[in-house]
Amino acid sequence: MRNVTLRQLRIVEAICRLGRINLAAEALRVTGPALTLQIQQLERDAGVPLFDRTRNGMVPTAYGIAFLEAARAVEDSLVRLEDSISAIKGLRTGRLRLGVVSTGKYFAPQLIAAFRDQVPGIEINLFIGNRAEIIAKLRDHEIDIALMGRPPRDVEVRAEVFGDHPLVFIASAGHALAGVLEIPRERIAQEQFLVREKGSGTRISLEIFLSDTPHKLEELGTEIASNETIKQAVIAGLGIAFISAHTIEQEVKLGRLVILDVVETPIRRQWFSVSRSDRVTTPAMQAFERFLLAQGARYLPVVSKPYPANAFR
């Protein structure tokens, strides 16, 4: 396999990503027949089929997946090489592909802006997605660093804490529990919940919090896949929610939402900077990780006490 070219690896990646010869050819600016010949030649040289040709498109075989992993590893190596050359030249330049779970979009812009002020030569490509999407991008080498609440267990990673992540119960200002102190778990479990999709960090934390009550989360609430929609539904009085305190600063200050004083809350989690442990960190990654550890926490909204008034300081 020493004769495999970078062009061939990029062809494999494009077909895996797009699923069809014509789409991959268009993305690579070649003709469909030329791309087909390249794949056929690569399959002959390797002695194995890289794709199953189906009515729904090109599906990579196990061999094709192995080639895809090699293609992504080579691209990562080229990015690191470019950054290393810049570092040797004394240039504070490079590229960073940053993935942020959707809850983090409330502070990520300020954090990135502060980093760019200090290291203006580093280009940052930002990806926002739910937890599953960010983990998939990390697994597939599509991002360099992920900011998330819990490091994944099915990917070998390096993880560093850079700040607290409090989770709280919220309700509309006119809710019957607004202003009530020390609400028991059993009482809050009787409410109608608006919850994130299965697998989200806040939903998992809520399930754990209510695990010793007789209520099942599936019976308690309505599933909503957006923090913004959840907040608007709570404001409208459709139920209560368990949510990151970083997402509600403005609504609490404006009096549209209140934080309920539920016993043993806020639940304190942490924000992590996560990267794959099987790759060498680039100078751009190192610079961003140093910035996060030294200054990242100051760009997170800070919750004091879970009372309706003065919830943020």
Image: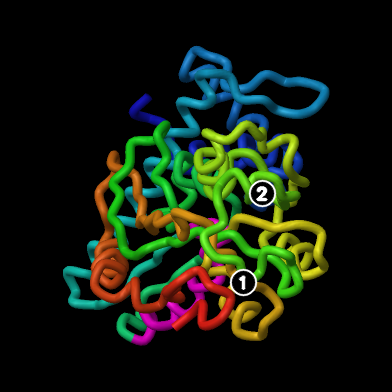
Observer-nearest of 309 and 125: 309
* Image quadrant in which you'd find residue 43: top right
Look at the image and tell me whether residue 86 can be seen.
no
* Image quadrant in which you'd find residue 18: top right
In the displayed structure, 102 sits above or below 59; it is below
Horizontal and vertical percent for residue 161? 30, 57
Magenta-colored stretch includes residue 115: yes
* Image quadrant in which you'd find residue 160: bottom left
Residue in the picture at 52% in, 60% down:
182
Of helix, strand and loop, which one carries label 2? loop
Of helix, strand and loop, which one carries label 1? loop
Q: Which residue is mark 2?
A: 196
Q: Which residue is mark 1?
A: 179
Q: The magenta stretch spans which residues?
A: 99-117
Observer-nearest of 28 and 136: 136
Look at the image and tell me whether residue 135 can be seen.
yes
Observer-nearest of 195 and 86: 195
Left or right, 264 with respect to 173, comes to left
Residue in the picture at 31% in, 68% down:
292
Q: Amino acid at mark 2?
A: Arg
Left or right, 236 with respect to 278, comes to right
Left or right, 40 with respect to 235, comes to left
Observer-nearest of 210 and 78: 210
In the displayed structure, 30 sits above or below 282; it is above
Horizontal and vertical percent for residue 93? 32, 74
Horizontal and vertical percent for residue 293? 26, 67
